[in-house]
Image (cartoon, rainbow, N blue to C red):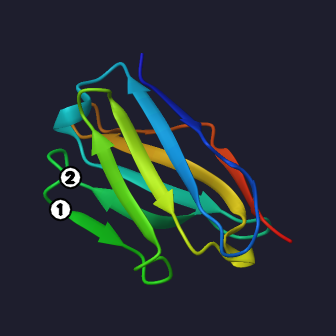
Amino acid sequence: QVQLVESGGGLVLPGGSLRLSCVASGFTFSSYPMSWYRQAPGKERELIASISGTSSNTNYADFVKGRFTISRDNAKNTLYLQMNSLKPEDTAVYYCKVYLAVARMTYWGKGTLVTVSS
């Protein structure tokens, strides 16, 4: 079955960096675009960034452009999110997501908590 497992979250000071990982299994990872989302307390889940299967195309929300970088290693079935210059407003649970078009199903990981605080 499809599984997405995020890791790498934690407590970081403002201005600091973290790298999140999402290990995927149960589908042909390299064939599908992947996305990172986040959900802050009391707010709706929002799209941060997405990447095509070959990494040829990436897209970012305006509020992370220039600070976050999405990447993937298809040999390791792993999606990454490098987060730099973190701000308190980046505090949220971060999720990876895949939409499998053949099955018309969307899968989410359980998320990893990022807290940016002094």
> In this rendering, would 38 be left or right of 77?
right
Is the Cβ of the residue at disc 1 closer than 8 Å to that at disc 2? yes
The residue that mark 1 highlights is 57
The residue that mark 2 highlights is 52
Residue at 46% x, 66% y is: 48
> In this rendering, would 78 be left or right of 6?
left
Q: Position of residue 78 (x, y in %)?
A: 37, 34
Identity, as a three-letter code, of the amino acid under mark 2: Ser
Identity, as a three-letter code, of the amino acid under mark 1: Asn
State whether residue 26 is above or below residue 5.
above
Q: In this orientation, which residue lies closer to the viewer: 39 or 54?
A: 54
Q: Around disc 2, counting alpha carbons within 10 Å, would you say few (fewer than 14), some (14 to 19), or many (20 or more)?
A: some
Residue at 63% x, 72% y is: 86
The quadrant of the rendering that contains the C terminus is bottom right
Say whether residue 102 is visible. no
Q: Around disc 1, counting alpha carbons within 10 Å, would you say few (fewer than 14), some (14 to 19), or many (20 or more)?
A: few
